[in-house]
Amino acid sequence: EAGVAQSPRYKIIEKRQSVAFWCNPISGHATLYWYQQILGQGPKLLIQFQNNGVVDDSQLPKDRFSAERLKGVDSTLKIQPAKLEDSAVYLCASSLVGGVGTDTQYFGPGTRLTVL
Amino acid sequence: ILNVEQSPQSLHVQEGDSTNFTCSFPSSNFYALHWYRWETAKSPEALFVMTLNGDEKKKGRISATLNTKEGYSYLYIKGSQPEDSATYLCAFYNTDKLIFGTGTRLQVFP
């Protein structure tokens, strides 16, 4: 079974530039998550999709971050414009059901973003 | 604000040593606790999902216990190997999302 795919793996941009990350979840998984992991901290949920609808985006900085999940499969996360504090690893995960405490989330390898 | 704490922050052990780490979480409104292993440049890998007080799970040389009444979980690695070097993350399921700790970074020297 193929895992969660993410691209690019690394990205370096200057502040005020835009950047986009792509995620392809495990086939058949209804729920997709984007996490931000800043160095020295645990991953923090930015947004959760159930199929192509948003379930939770309470921690997404909506003035600069946006995300969409096309046709309930792939997803893109965009930052526009980037700030220095956006430097982090952006992890995508998917799970079969979502909304259940025992539902295992499967993670991609992440995109390491450096904002200069 | 819910807090999930892990200790120690980092650990260096010799090959063959056994080791353990702690994850502390709120003891009220418990749903589930997840453990992940995250090797450098790889995807975080799910190890265990624990739900019941007193639960004990095992996967090879790695095992975990759960105490929901006092709000902690232990992860044990028996006879550590260099390939066990990774960051071990725990995550507390809070009604609708996972809240992650900052992780324990384990380095096993041959």
Image: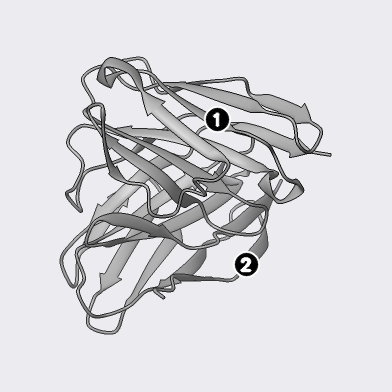
| Residue A26 vertical placement versus A112 (above, below) | above
State the mark number for residue A8.
Answer: none
Residue topped by disc 1: A78
> Residue A13's image quarter?
top right
Left or right relative to B22: residue B67? left
Q: Secondary structure at mark 2?
A: loop
> Residue B34's image quarter?
bottom left
Chain to which the residue tagged by mark 1 belongs: A
| Residue B84 vertical placement versus A16 (above, below) | below
> Residue A54's image quarter?
top left
Chain to which the residue tagged by mark 2 belongs: B
Quadrant including the N terminus of chain B: bottom left
List x then y, in percent, for residue A28. 21, 19
Amino acid bearing label 1: Lys
User: Taking the image as drawn, is residue A48 in sight?
Assistant: yes
Mark 2 vs mark 1, foreground winner is 1
Amino acid bearing label 2: Gln
Disc 2 to disc 1, C-alpha distance = 32 Å
**Residue drawn 63% across and 34% down?**
A80
**Residue drawn 30% across and 18% down?**
A73
Counting labels gives: 2
**Residue drawn 65% across and 63% down?**
B11
Residue B100 vs residue A71, the one in the foreground? A71
List x then y, in percent, for residue B39. 58, 39
State the mark number for residue B9.
Answer: 2
